[in-house]
Amino acid sequence: MSGLVLVTGAAGRIGTWLRGGLPERGWAVRSLDVVPVPDVRPGEEQVVADVTDLVAMVDATEGASAVVHMAGISGESTWPAIRHANIEGTFCALEAARLTGVPRVVLASSNHATGYTPRPDGGLLREVDAPPRPDTYYGVSKVTMEALGSLYVDRYGLDVVCLRIGSAFPEPTTTRQLSTWLSPDDTVSLVDAALTTPSPGFSVVWGVSANTRNWWDLSAARALGYEPQDDAEVYAEALIEVHGEPDLGDQVHGRVGGEYTTAEFDAEH
Ligand code: 15L
């Protein structure tokens, strides 16, 4: 499968990676953001609109073969801000897909949907063993995103793949991210797999690279066709030199949501 993909949040970090990488994998991209995307590429379509504006979203979704919904606040914020941008925005993305007959939506969920989930004693944590356990209002919006996705599959027959993204940054900058990093190239591969896998129905998968220190099970993501290439371990020596060996007894390393589950984070937000 390939065709035209509407990417929301196209001017953001992940949106920018997708605008660069999806065309190389045969996708035409229609980029949507509240601000104009810089350097529109040849063949790229651009829409400046707010994801919470359903009328604009229906217009923008018309003619696409899939929606990749990345727009939203990408960390903790106030409840009104999260509710508006993340929950209303996700509703509009799904509702626009339904109204225009677009069959597939890929949603940027997050590990923070299940942030308080503890690290298993041994072995890898499967998505099915990590039900909603949000660590923040942001996490609640990602739980709601997954719930809305499930509803649109069961009620309206869409295909919806939720990516529980780990730490999508150019490179890992903390020792937690030695386990949770999702590299730019692997981000594109994961989204491409979510777009191309045949008939996924409703699917929730972790989004991390092939990190040596992974403790989130990638079997479900690999079953979609995701083949991660990068490993945060190449940054381990330098990060450990600065921050010390990760203490697995510490909440930062012992819970899915890491820092977001600590008293320090709470005090700051
Ligand atoms: C996320 O969902 C956030 O968007 C990002 O800023 C990081 O906090 C990341 O999770 C993470 O857990 O490292």
Image (cartoon, rainbow, N blue to C red):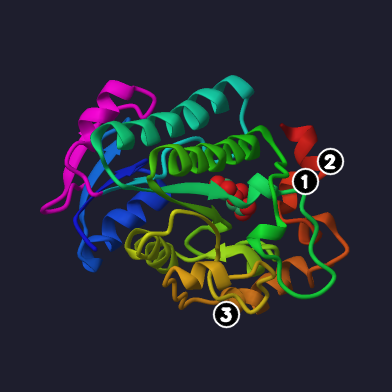
- Name the image quarter holding the C terminus: top right
Considering the numbered disc 2 on the image, is that residue within a helix, a strand or a loop? Answer: helix
Whether residue 38 is visible = no
Q: CA distance from mark 2 to mark 3?
A: 30 Å
Mark 2 sits near ligand 1, with its Cβ under 8 Å away: no
167 or 243, nearer to the observer: 167
268 or 221, nearer to the observer: 221
* Rendering coords of residue 82 (x, y %): 56, 28
Q: Residue at x 37, y 45 (%)?
A: 158
Going by the numbered disc 3, the residue's amino acid type is Val
Q: CA distance from mark 1 to mark 3?
A: 27 Å
Whether residue 192 is visible = yes
Q: Which residue is mark 1?
A: 261
60 or 244, nearer to the observer: 60
Q: Is residue 80 above or below residue 101?
A: above
Q: Which residue is mark 3?
A: 234
Mark 1 sits near ligand 1, with its Cβ under 8 Å away: no
Please rate how many residues cluster around mark 2, counting C-alpha atoms within 10 Å: few if below 14, some from 14 to 19, many from 20.
few
Q: What is the magenta range?
A: 39-65
Considering the numbered disc 3 on the image, is that residue within a helix, a strand or a loop? Answer: helix
Q: Residue at x 41, y 52 (%)?
A: 14
* Rendering coords of residue 257 (x, y %): 70, 51
